[in-house]
Amino acid sequence: MARYNEAAKSSGSIILCCSGFDSIPVDLLNYAVAKCIRQKYNADTRNARTFITNFSGSVSGGTLASIFALLEVFSLRDISEAHAPWSLSTRKGSSLQRNVPHVTWDSDLAMYGGSWIGDSVDRSVAGRSWSILNYGPNWTTYGYLGFGAWYKAYAYLSALYFGTFIIGIPPIRYLLKKYVIQPGSGPSQKQRDSGFLEMQGIGESDDADRHKVKATFRIVDADPGYKGTAAMLACVALTLALDVGKTEAGSGGGGFWTPASLGESLVGRLDTAGITLQVNDI
């Protein structure tokens, strides 16, 4: 973004980042919650969070190869800075956000959550949407994988820490590249057609009443990282091609934008593809 944003602005090109499983669900959940709170309660949003509450999907060899390549091309400092809170935002938020994976208990969903492996990326994208669409000065968000028991959340988090540690060791990374899933390999057609995702987002109004709103994002009969991502990418492309004039991105001109900047135009196209976003009070 640092390299091409100004060129995109000058040419009028609209570049949409992270328009698949990373990070459309999280970005649109935060957008939908903040929009509902603004319209219904005339308030800003605070304390937003997303939970993966039901999920079936697979990891591809290409995804693992991308992770390995990232570690070989960029320094740990570069990666850390890119994944820092507000790293993609047009301005920094006033609220502090932890960037350390952790376990939490959510009383509204009655479940534990361990920091989702893609949370730092999702949070950076949602943070850019926050700075473009103005969710409020005290807005923060975190993404979790939901669990019914605390020990499962801690077991998952321990595995996440361990996996992050071992892929940072070059000899182990070499062995993983050579003997684990290879680029081009992945789930079968049956697996791609039977995956699903349910992710829930919650936020509070930033006022004395603390009204709570919940949104639910669903993908059915599609692996979120394969068939689901293909559908999401297609919906983004169609929105840019046919409806961009109705969106924040279209009115704002060239540069780097986010899925949420396509607003209801994208939400509507996703719905026709069987990918739904619903909003309710708690």
Image: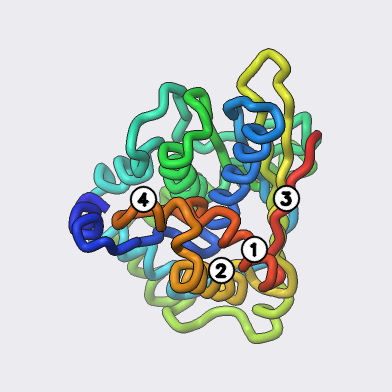
Mark-to-mark CA distance, 4 and 2: 22 Å
Q: Nearer the viewer, mark 1 or mark 4?
A: 4
For disc 2, the neighbor class at 10 Å (few under 14, some 14 to 19, many from 20) is many
Task: Indicate the position of residue 114 as horizontal and vertical percent values.
Answer: 62, 41
Q: Amino acid at mark 1?
A: Gly
| Helix, strand or loop for disc 1 | helix
Which residue bears the numbered disc 1?
A: 268
Describe residue 80's horizontal placement relative to residue 26 as left or right. Answer: left
Number of marks in the image? 4
For disc 4, the neighbor class at 10 Å (few under 14, some 14 to 19, many from 20) is some
Which colour scheme appears in the figure? rainbow
Q: Residue furthest top?
A: 208
Which residue bears the numbered disc 3?
A: 216
Which residue bears the numbered disc 4?
A: 252
Point out the tag, 4 or 2, that comes first from the N-terminus. 2
Q: Residue at x 51, y 46 (%)?
A: 119
Describe residue 208's horizontal placement relative to residue 180 as left or right. Answer: right
Q: Residue at x 44, y 79 (%)?
A: 182
For disc 3, the neighbor class at 10 Å (few under 14, some 14 to 19, many from 20) is many
Q: Is residue 35 above or below residue 166?
A: above
Mark-to-mark CA distance, 1 and 3: 15 Å
Quadrant housing the C terminus: top right
Q: Amino acid at mark 3?
A: Thr
